[in-house]
Amino acid sequence: MRSRKICCEKQDEVFHSGQSQIVVIHNGLLRVKTGDCTLNVVAGCGIYFSQGDYLLEYTPIDGQYRASVIEFDNEFVSKLLQKHSELLMSFPKVANIQSGLFSFTLNILIKQTLSGMKTLEEQSYPDAIMRLKYEEMLILLLHGEQGEHLYALLSQLTNKSSERLRRFMERHYLKEWKLTDYAQEFGASLTTFKELFNEYYGISPRAWISERRILHAHKLLLTSKMSIVDVAMESGFSSQSYFTQSYRRRFGTTPSKVRTGDEQVTIGK
C-alpha cells in the first residue's frame, strides 16, 4: 500500500493502470472519467480500477488531497477467486460491465483492514501477511453492496480470451486500421470480435479506440514538447484539423489553448 498526496492546487492527469488497484480517499476529491462514465470519489470512499486508461482530476480540500493506493496482479486475483469459489458461486451474473470501475463507501470492517495494513507497513511484516490483508479487503468488498459488479470485473482478469483482447488492444490501438483489420489480426470474424469487445469493455471498438487515442494525445500535450501536429499523428489522427475537432468535442477546448495554459481541461460532472 502506498500513499498519494497533493497540496494546494487541483491537478489532472491521464492515468494508465497497468494492474488492478484500489484507491481510498482520506482527504479531497478524486474525479474519474472513462468513456461516458464519470465518478466522484470523496473522503471516506474508495474506487477499484481495472487495467486501462483513465482521466483523473485531483481536488484538494483545505489545501490537501490524500489517498491510499493498493495494487495487486492478475495471479493474486486468480488465486483468490479459486480459493473462495464456493462463497462466490452464488453471485448473480452481471451481463454488461460499462466502465471497469467499482466505487464503494468505507465501513467499519474496511477501515479496520486499512488500519491493519498501515500497521503492517510501519512494522515491516513479511509481504505474505500483507497479501492476506489485501485478500481480506477484496472479500469484504465482494460481500458488500453490489459486490457482484466487482466480482464481474475481477473475473475478467482470469478470462483468457478477455486478457488476450486487452493485451492486443493495448499494443495496437494507435494503428491506422479498419475494424476488419483489427478483427483479422486478432484472429476472429468481425462479428465475434465486436461481441467479445462489447462483453469486455461495454462499448463498441470504435468508441473505445477514439477515447484511448484522445487520452493519449492529451497526455502528450501535457507531458511532451511535441508540436500539435506531431501529437495528432502520434496519436493516430489523420490530420491536425480532425484532431482539433475531436479534442474540442471531447474536452470543450482546443489543444493549442491547453498547450499554452490559456485553458484547463475540466472533467465533466
Image (tube, rainbow, N blue to C red):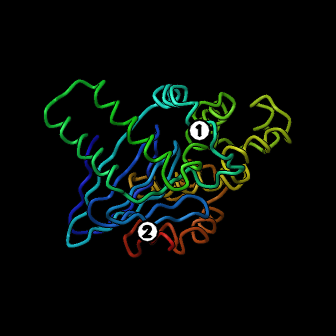
Q: How many numbered markers are drawn?
A: 2
Task: Identify the residue shown where x is 72% and y is 45%.
Answer: 199
Q: Nearer the viewer, mark 1 or mark 2?
A: 1
Query: Viewed as shown, does residue 115 lie left or right of 79?
Result: left
User: Residue 48: percent from the left, percent from the top?
Assistant: 46, 49
Judge by depth and name the residue closer to the eye, 252 or 151.
151
Q: Please tell me in which quadrant of the rendered image residue 108 appears.
A: bottom left
Q: Please tell me in which quadrant of the rendered image residue 154 appears.
A: top right
Q: Which residue is mark 1?
A: 170
Cα–Cα span, label 1 and label 2: 26 Å
Q: Amino acid at mark 1?
A: Glu
User: Residue 219: percent from the left, percent from the top?
Assistant: 45, 54
Judge by depth and name the residue closer to the eye, 17 or 43.
43
User: Residue 149: percent from the left, percent from the top?
Assistant: 58, 50
Residue 118, numbered circle = none
From what the image shows, is residue 173 above or below residue 46?
above
SS class of the residue under badge 2? helix
SS class of the residue under badge 1? helix
Residue 258, numbered circle = 2
Q: Earlier in the sequence, mark 1 or mark 2?
A: 1
Judge by depth and name the residue closer to the eye, 142 or 4.
142
Q: Amino acid at mark 2?
A: Val
User: Residue 106: percent from the left, percent from the top?
Assistant: 36, 57
Q: Evaluate if marks 1 and 2 touch, with contact meaning CB atoms under 8 Å apart.
A: no
From what the image shows, is residue 78 above or below residue 53?
above
Query: Viewed as shown, does residue 104 lie left or right of 93?
Result: left
Q: Residue furthest left?
A: 123
Badge 2 local density, few (<14 within 10 Å), some, or many (20+)?
some
Query: Viewed as shown, does residue 231 lie left or right of 112?
Result: right
Badge 1 local density, few (<14 within 10 Å), some, or many (20+)?
some
Task: Identify the residue shown where x is 69% and y is 30%.
Answer: 161
